[in-house]
Amino acid sequence: MAAIIEIKNITKEFKVLNRREGLKGSLKDLFSRNYKTVRAVDSVSMSIEQGEIVGYLGPNGAGKSTTIKMMTGVLEPTSGEILVNGCVPYKNRTKNAQNIGVVFGQRSQLWWALPLIESFKLLKDIYQIPDADYEGMLQLYRSLVDIEPLLHKPVRQMSLGQRTLSDILAAFLHNPKIVFLDEPTIGLDVSMKAKIRTLIHALNKEKKTTVILTTHDMGDVDALCRRIVIIDHGKMLYDNDIEHLKSFFGSYRTLKVRADGELAKQTEAIQKEFPEFSVSADEEEEWISVLVDEEKQKVLDVLAQLQKTHRIRDMQLEEISTEEVIKKIYEEGVR
Amino acid sequence: MKAKRYLALTRAGIIEEMQFRASFLIMVVGNLLYLIVVYFLWKAIYASAGTDVVSGMTFNDTMIYLVLATALFNFLDLYTVWQIGRDIQTGKIVLDLLKPMEYRKYLFWSYSGSFVTHFFLTFVPTFIVVAVVTHGAIPLGINILYFMISVVMAISINYSIDFFVGTICLYTESIWGINIMKQVIVLLLSGATIPIAFFPEPLKSIVYYLPFQSIYNAPLSLLLDSSPSAEKVLTTLGMQLFWCVAMLIISKVFWKASLRQITVNGG
Amino acid sequence: MKRKGLRFYLHIYRKILAQDIKSKMSYRADFIISTLGMIFTNISGFVGFWILFRNFPSINGWTYHEMLFLYGFSLVSITPVQCLFDNNWSLRQQVYSGDFIKYCFRPINLFFYYQSEVFDIKGLGQLAFGIGTIAYSWSRIGLAFTPLVLLKLIVFLITASLIMIALQNAAAATCFWIQNSFYVLDLAFRFKDYAKYPVTIFSTVFRFIFTFIVPIAFIAYYPSLVILRPDEIPLLSWLSPFIGIAFFFVSYKIWMRGATRYSGTGS
């Protein structure tokens, strides 16, 4: 099967204005300005197939959104090749737009003052969706989520969760081949997150839509993605199965404890006891975190051992976060 | 220290203004264009009138008046109404009300940076150019002092009017409508676009008793008169002082009353 | 996929317009105040005009009623920019906040999609004012009224309106390059006020500038000649429809170029 998105060595550079500080600096800026070049995306290549859900991860400012803007045809790459659905996006923006759907951050693309159903009707005309397909899609939506209460509500009166849900539905309405979802669950509560994940999963199954998902939430990734691409400082760090990544980070757990005694001293003592694991202190919340590699020692053993030497008031067990995974990959490379 | 706090706001305002190099240039170009149009228009008017003096003003008088009125306008008009309206609509006003200074003062001092920059970057250069080009058509004497006093009161009256109009935004979302009404009324009735000397009776007398002419007409008529009679100085400044105080009280009372009503009703 | 022709766009525009008006009507107070603001603007413009020209039987060979005709013509020809392209005023904020990106993902013309979002109904008040002024001056001058003249008037009004649209598009598009483009837009908007004077009052240099560089003379003066002075119509008057179209096209290209260059803030 041919790739639906084919990216070869794309790079994007921006010119950024250096502003000088203070009253004197701003006077100087009045007469001369200096720019520096920032490379937001640095020779990234990937190939994505129809029907995949790809988790596109990386810390803030890593270049995720820039890549997506290039795939959607909003930005022209400085160099490299990019083919989406067989055409070059920035050269055929409107043609490309017919085949993609986008939910970008928390910015609603719906008409603010209109009830959702009116937005849908406008989208039907704009994307020239045949009546039968449109009805079929609404039917599908009804079977997946309870949209009736949303349909007649103006977008501006919706809660963030309802708005995100509406935006996702709107993005899938014209049955695009690819949907880009940028942080779709940010700021939502647990039940809304689950609802949105189920919806995305079902739509992908039903319509074989390719989904590119950027997120900071490992929960989104676990629930939806089979494949993961990680980018940092514009460079690609990882592109492989989630299983592979799991084998890499799956054995890690973060054990957080609150122990009696001075935070710094306790942290130091624990680090001495477990020299193999990295121990850090969160001064604000007074947590001491131990990143435990379970292949070496089980978390519960670590906890049991700690309880013998320290008075533990409180404890928490956490999965390793995206940020920590990226940090690990950065530090140790990919096995 | 109190003064220091206010001056910090002034300084921040100046820096912010400087960031917009292009807008300065454009403002200057815009004014030049406006004045060119005005120049040719009045030239045509005077040429067609067939006399040198119309309504007691020569072509030179009219031009000097209009050039300086434009320069004054540039540093007086700071889109305060928009700012208040936006603060109210975005809810930022709630934070501003919690600040340890009165909102009215806070906003004024935030704008003071713009006052200072605009005064030195638009009014002073314009004044110098006009003074040089017209070879002393602008008298340089005690009138400058009267003018300075008058301008300070004009700033205050203008701000009070703006603040009063801005307060209306507590009741309606239509900032544009409110602002445009204020702007056209002030511009016309203050003599900023057409010197009040040209107004026909009885419009002239009515306008004279309104607060608007204190903003442009009053300071400019003091500036352009080389030897004003004591009576003229006193009545002009007295009238300004009256409006200064009156508008201050009116705008303050209106703001307080509106705020109370809004908080009672839960806005 | 069907080709997206004029019919497609007209259909979409009608739908969006209907929805927009429906939702605007739910803000009745805002609508009323904005309309009042518009009426105020026109009345004060008219009063200013009247104060200025009431003393003089003619200016530069133009009678009072002929001047009034120009004034009315300019009011009508700047209505489309007010009604149909009002969203240009928010372009700056949308680009600055990054919200503009949402317009880039639809499979229709970006410029069209952006402008279609807002229709400013209150501009229709200005249209009525302008038509009234044209009709009044028409009857006072005693011009002939035939279907052919009416057709000419309509064609020239529509093409003249393209000039102001072009100016505003180009001015709004500067926000893709410079930070505080409000001043540019404001400057361009002020040009509409200069359009109501006959270009003959200017010196040769400025006549050239206002004809070929910032072509405001085509907003009212040149097209009006076709109606007002049917015996001595200069070539430029006949060219005015083409100049309107050409300038609109260029401004459209600039706007689109800026939008494509636009990269969105943040990451």
Image (cartoon, coloured by chain):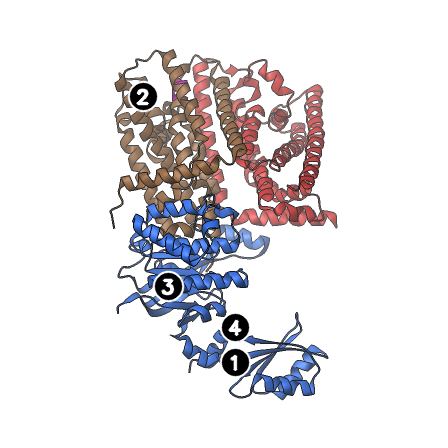
Q: Which residue is mark 1?
A: A252
Q: Position of residue B135 (x, y in %)?
A: 54, 28
**B128 with respect to C152 (left or right):** right
Q: Amino acid at mark 3?
A: Asn
Q: Amino acid at mark 2?
A: Leu
Question: Rounded to the nearest whole Å, what is the CA distance between mark 1 and mark 4?
Answer: 10 Å
> What is the span of residues highlighted in magenta in the rendered image?
C67-71
Discs 2, 1: same chain: no
Task: Check the rendered structure and report the hue given to chain B.
Answer: red
Residue C224 at least partly seen: yes
Discs 3, 4: same chain: yes
First-in-chain label (1 vs 4): 1
Q: Which residue is mark 4?
A: A321
Q: Quadrant of the N terminus of chain A?
A: bottom left
**B243 with respect to C143 (left or right):** right
Q: Which residue is mark 2?
A: C225
First-in-chain label (3 vs 1): 3
Q: Which residue is mark 3?
A: A204
Residue A78 at least partly seen: no
Q: Chain of mark 1?
A: A
**Residue C167 is one of the magenta-drawn residues:** no
- Up/down of A211 relative to B61, above or below: below
**Nearer-the-camera pick, A179 or C238:** A179
Q: Quadrant of residue C190?
A: top left
Element type at mark 4: loop
First-in-chain label (3 vs 4): 3
Question: Rounded to the nearest whole Å, what is the CA distance between mark 3 and mark 2?
Answer: 64 Å
Element type at mark 2: helix
